[in-house]
Amino acid sequence: MSFWIIQTLNGLSFSMMLFLVASGFTLIFGLMKIINIAHGSFYLLGAYIGLTVLKATGNFLLATLASSIGVVLVGIIMQRFFLRRFHMKELQQVLLTFGFVFIIADLCLWIWGGNPQALPKPSLLKGSIWIGSVVFPSYRLFVILVGILVAIGLWIFQEKTKFGAIVRAGVDDEEMLRGTGINIQVVFVGVFALGALLAGIGGMIGGPFVGVFPGVDLSMLLLALVVVIIGGIGSLKGAFLGSLFVGLVDNFGKALFPELSLFTLFAPMAIVLAIKPTGIFGRKEE
Amino acid sequence: MRKHLLMMMVFAFIFSFYSGGQRVAGAAEPIKIGYLAPYVGVFAKFGNDLKDGFKLYLEEIGYKVAGREIIFIDEDTEGKPEVGLVKAKKLVEKDQVHILAGIISSAVAYAVRDYVIEKKIPLVITNAGATKLTQEQRSPYIFRTSFANGQQDLAGGWYAYAKMGVRKIIMMGSDYAAGHEKAAGFMKTFKFMGGEVVEGIYPPLGTNDFAPYLAKVANYVGKVDRTWAFFAGSDAIRFVNQYDEYGLKEKIKLFCEEGVTDEANLPSQKDAVLGVESYARYSIGYDSVENKRFVSEYRKRYRYDPGSLSEGGYVGAKFIVKALEAVGGKIENQEAFLKALRGVKFEAPRGPVRFDDHQNVIFSTFIQRVDKKDGKYNNIVIDKIPDVDQYWMPKK
């Protein structure tokens, strides 16, 4: 019994971290149709900036704030000065964001060195919690909590706020939205920054257990891609369920069949693609 | 105007030719050492450690041996075999290097093996551990100053059984060639002594989350004596931190390969790694005159602690230079140089080193433990097994 409880909680904590990264990716794609290959780089940047501030001040909240500001700024610069020029030109966008992957990775290597590092946990969450007869690290419960809160926040944002309504309208019919006199460029920048912010927070939250090192940007991007392909690209609900699915399947796959670890990650993706090529919540292109 | 330009070019050409010729006539031509290591991506840190160590020794001798200048030419393999081979060709054919050295990845080492043998260029491997390179596929041109995968592990497996009293063990290592070769080395002597391996878990390289595997280890609490582990870089940090997080550190103690508790990892592992024991080809805490000097010089020059790769680079450079000294700098007489290199012996930071008959280094293996002093984490030596070679076997 305790095996199943622990593994489920493990899976959930990993799922929620995946959700933070994948939700930003899917938001950006949903509105702007940009496949942001540099999305994992926001994770990398967020974690490194957080680490630096954490080392200097020892304050987790302050570090989160600083890293959020950092990635949002980078996101705005990327969208405003580069990606905007290539609106709806998918190949150019992919190539451009791919270039950013290399630039950001090399800058990080230059500034922070290639030494793999882990973010220290906030001292409040260092210990473990007993759930019945099982021990579980409290930090991972915190990750689950943050993931759920962010998911609720995003849902409220999308469904209940005016800006959310504008974004939804933009996803459905961008030209009509322009026609109603809304400055779509501001919406674009806002959503891109929000996507970057989510990935940056993913880096802060994931930093203490996944760590930060050269190469984590691409491995995060890969996981985010698997999540959104399963969940349906462009859909927040899809990203949430996709994360749950990937996190849990991956976790139980590894625990039950350790030799097949990569298989259990990619096989579900292949099956979903074969049955429903748009993903579980994906919409057909008209 | 155009004519003038042409004239100037001709002059410049003749002049450069002239002065070039003069240099050859004046002093002896420099000895060129080509260096291959990865400096981007996941391996960047390893590559830089290896190079920093290598260059530290060259700096100590002022880039000069037997009156000849040493030129160090560095190329980035990116850790990829195909890139490594292209760079090796560039170093040999364009730069005309006399010796090749370096190489982190065994795949890169295999890729350049046939080429260096064909071109008759001595290759001094300062890290890559693939066993075959100094066993079945050895060559008089290939030397290895670091270790063969499984070499120090042979001593480790024996030590666990004979000195630590371990009878039952769980093996955990990264699922790639080095992980399996090291595990095999450890198990060879451990089983030979009578130990039992109750479980083998091999997660892929770059495992983001070890939690699912650790839940499996937790089932063995009280049933096994130790967990053996080999992970490197970011995997090692996650592994150690999560092993502690799940409360396993005290329940099933770790006995690791040195990569897990490399000095570079300790600042990120902190208290999770405190007290963890490992076996190592090099330990920063080894109390010898040469090692103390090396550590202090290294810290002074680069402002970080040397790990086993740093020491590996340093030792590789010293092997080459000692051989060059022995032949009076005459690298052109290759047969004499290779013979001299085979016979080089000296006191390295890790203790006395020399080559075996297959040109793989023999060294002492340290048993070490992570200790905390003045808020800083470092490995300290608790025992030493002298003269371990790649075929080392204990007596029962």
Image (tube, rainbow, N blue to C red):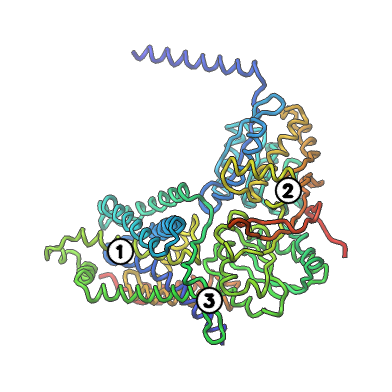
User: Where is mark 2, residue-wise?
Assistant: B350
Amino acid type indicated by mark 3 = Ser
The kind of secondary structure element at disc 2 is loop
User: Where is mark 3, residue-wise?
Assistant: A128
Percent across and percent down for residue A67 are 38, 59
Disc 3 crowd, CA 10 A, few/some/many (<14, 14-19, 20+): some
Amino acid type indicated by mark 1 = Leu
Chain containing the residue with disc 3: A
Chain containing the residue with disc 1: A
Q: Are marks 3 and 1 on the same chain?
A: yes
Foreground residue, B77 or B195? Answer: B195
Q: Is residue B339 above or below residue A183?
A: above
Q: Are marks 2 and 3 in contact (CB under 8 Å)?
A: no
User: Where is mark 1, residue-wise?
Assistant: A194
- At 77% from the left edge and 37% from the top edge, which residue is drawn? B341
Front position among marks 2 and 3: 3
Q: Is residue A140 above or below residue B372?
A: below
Q: Is residue A240 above or below residue A196?
A: below
